[in-house]
Amino acid sequence: MSDERPPDDGIVLTEAQKRSRRNRSIATALALGILVLLFFAVTLVKGPAVLNRPL
């Protein structure tokens, strides 16, 4: 018994939607990169003393 069906194309995006999705992805990547750099900078400013705090 072969259950072969033609592949379903699903949702096909227009060029404008593809461009919008790409721009959103780039914006998300930039925001994440800036956040990582911010955390890194704060860690450098605080220095190694960040681990020597009283319990």
Image: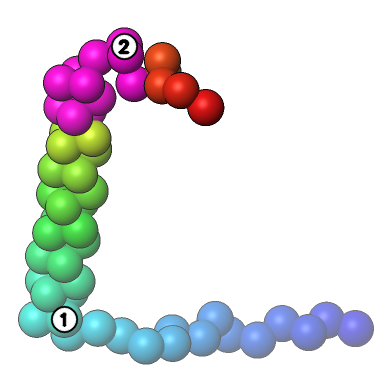
Q: In which quarter of the image is the N terminus?
A: bottom right
Residue at 31 percent of width and 85 percent of height:
12
Q: Name the residue under label 2.
A: 48
**Residue segment shown in magenta:** 40-50
Say which quarter of the image contains residue 33.
top left
Above or below for 23 versus 42: below
Which residue ends up furthest to the right in the rendered image? 1
Above or below for 44 versus 37: above
Label located before the other in sequence (1 or 2): 1
Q: Which of 38 and 48 is in front in this view?
A: 48
Q: Name the residue under label 1.
A: 17
Q: Does the magenta stretch include residue 49?
A: yes
**Residue 51, percent from left and from top:** 41, 18
Spatial separation of the CA atoms under disc 1 and disc 2: 47 Å
Above or below for 46 versus 33: above
Q: Can residue 15 be seen in this view?
A: no
Say which quarter of the image contains residue 41.
top left
Please indicate whether residue 49 sits to the left or right of residue 53 in the image: left
Q: Does the magenta stretch include residue 42?
A: yes
Q: Is residue 41 visible?
A: yes
Q: Which of 35 and 51 is in front in this view?
A: 51
Residue 27: which disc? none
The kind of secondary structure element at disc 1 is helix
User: Which mark is in front, 1 or 2?
Assistant: 2
**Residue 22, percent from left and from top:** 16, 64
**Main secondary structure of the magenta stretch:** helix
Residue at 43 percent of width and 84 percent of height:
9
**Local crowd at mark 1 within 10 Å, few (<14), some, or many (≥20)?**
few
Q: What residue type is labelled 1?
A: Gln
Which residue ends up furthest to the front in the rendered image? 54
